[in-house]
Amino acid sequence: MQDFLVRGGRFPDELIAHLPPLKTECTVEKIAINAVMAGAPPESMPLLIAAIEAMADPKFDLAGLNATTGSVVPAVIVNGPVRNKLGIPYQAGCLGGVAGSAAGIGRALRLIMRNVAGQLIDSTSQSVYGTPGRVAGIVFGEWEERSPWAPLAERRGVKGDAVTVYGAMGTANICDVVADSAEGFLEIIAKSMAYPGANGFLTSSAFSETLCAINPVWAEVIARQFPDMRDVQAFLWDKCALPIDWWRPEYRKPIEALGRIKADGRVHLVPTSDDVLVMVAGGLGGLHAAMLHSWGTCLTVTRAISE
Amino acid sequence: MTIVLDPTAGSNADIATPGPDAGPLAGKRVAIRIDMLWRSWDWVSQIWAEELRAEGAQVEFWRSCGRTGEEGRVAAEEYAAVLARADMAIVGLGNCGSCTSWTIADALQAAATGIPTIAVATAHFEALAKNLARRGGRSGLRLHILPYPLDILPRSEVDDIARNQYRSFLRDFGVRSGLAQLSAA
């Protein structure tokens, strides 16, 4: 415990956040106790504290996220040199299964949600299915060294060591063995993300985001044609849509009421290209991208990790 | 020596009383909080609003939409303004996890202003609503329960439920009116 508190660089009784649904005080000491129980490394304390601060930002809607019927878990994305210092995975197997500290760090955050925030299935959480990520979290990094674009956190205004929390409805794979161009890769990613049951298409959500991780092999090809990430996001946003006629007739009225049917008759998954989050991660085997759909109107939050 | 540390955190102090009764309806301004999720709650609250107006109350609806970011900031201001104008508040609908969380949060905010407040949820989410109210420091929050499932029922059935439950709703709200007293007798 002593080591964890020292590495955290804060007083044990310092209040980090009030965490819903219990609205209880999450102190540095509570984070440390749960981190010890989870087997997280002491050096991860600054990351854990920053992640909790980010989740407690009202933009993240943790109160709703922790109670929802949805199968959501805050995904924790790490940028900066701290990735290598802590052994956060960002290469092959980064979303689960690779040896390293991610499982311990993720488990610590899950225990904090359970023990401090009070998220308990059938009590305060109504999640119909839950998700494997609620066991040991989803903790991974960006392969910045192989990314042709600026790091995700830097594009969101935080350079260097940073944590980004994203309300993820699990992870899903996108596989392709035909595409050989930037547009080909992006189009299969975008069209795969535009499935009708995705959060962004729900008429109960006023707005939403979506996130995809592109492997370094595809990213290199894509960046030759789209060196500016904003163009990547714009392309993905444009193709990530379904024609309104795809839905049964009773869907038109509520979708129309939200003003979401464009002049060309398409409905986009998310309101703007800024709402399409893109990062580079994954192994050099290529062939796959990963999509992480958002939940509700939970907005992504990025925080600096302070030593 | 081994010291065992507690990984959990305690909950807040509690207000176990339901707060003031709604009392007579004539001349009162009633705020009804609806949402963008549940058409059934739109239907129920429309019928209840007609009944409330028939008893002399003025009804103002407020629809909860996006609650994060800039839209959320505007929504928070709007809701606070609605509560400031209201003599009593009806807040719903708790019919899923996150919407129950927001329903109770908004009901607790209304109750904290001192006005008579009642939250409305469906039966499946009653336990969650009570749990969240207790965690939010007000276990005595008034709660009216509608049947579950509700939102997949045809409008005619939902309308019947709204009419059939109006009197019990008034009683739960602490309304003193001819209709409520008649039904209580």
Image (cartoon, rainbow, N blue to C red):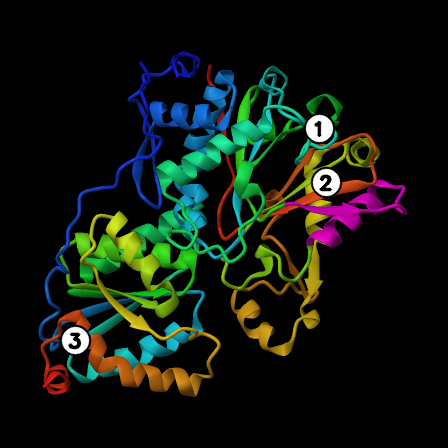
The residue marked by circle 1 belongs to what chain? A
> What residue does disc 1 label?
A149
To the question of a shared chain for discs 2 and 1, the answer is yes
Amino acid at circle 3:
Arg
Whether residue A166 can be seen here: no
Element at badge 2? helix
The residue marked by circle 3 belongs to what chain? B
Q: State which region is magenta.
A: A171-193
> What residue does disc 2 label?
A232
Using a 10 Å C-alpha cutoff, classify the residue at mark 3 as few (fewer than 14 neighbours), some (14 to 19) or many (20 or more): many
Q: Quadrant of the N terminus of chain A?
A: top left
Q: Is residue B157 above or below residue B32?
A: below
Q: CA distance from mark 1 to mark 3?
A: 62 Å
Q: CA distance from mark 2 to mark 1?
A: 10 Å
For the residues carrying marks 2 and 3, which lies nearer the camera in this image? 3
- Judge by depth and name the residue closer to the eye, A184 or B85: A184
Query: Residue A237's x, y, as percent?
Result: 68, 49
Using a 10 Å C-alpha cutoff, classify the residue at mark 1 as few (fewer than 14 neighbours), some (14 to 19) or many (20 or more): many
Element at badge 1? loop
To the question of a shared chain for discs 1 and 3, the answer is no
Q: Residue at x 44, y 84 (%)?
A: B155
Query: Residue A42's x, y, as percent?
Result: 48, 17
Q: CA distance from mark 2 to mark 3?
A: 58 Å
Q: Quadrant of residue B13?
A: top left
Q: Is residue A179 magenta?
A: yes
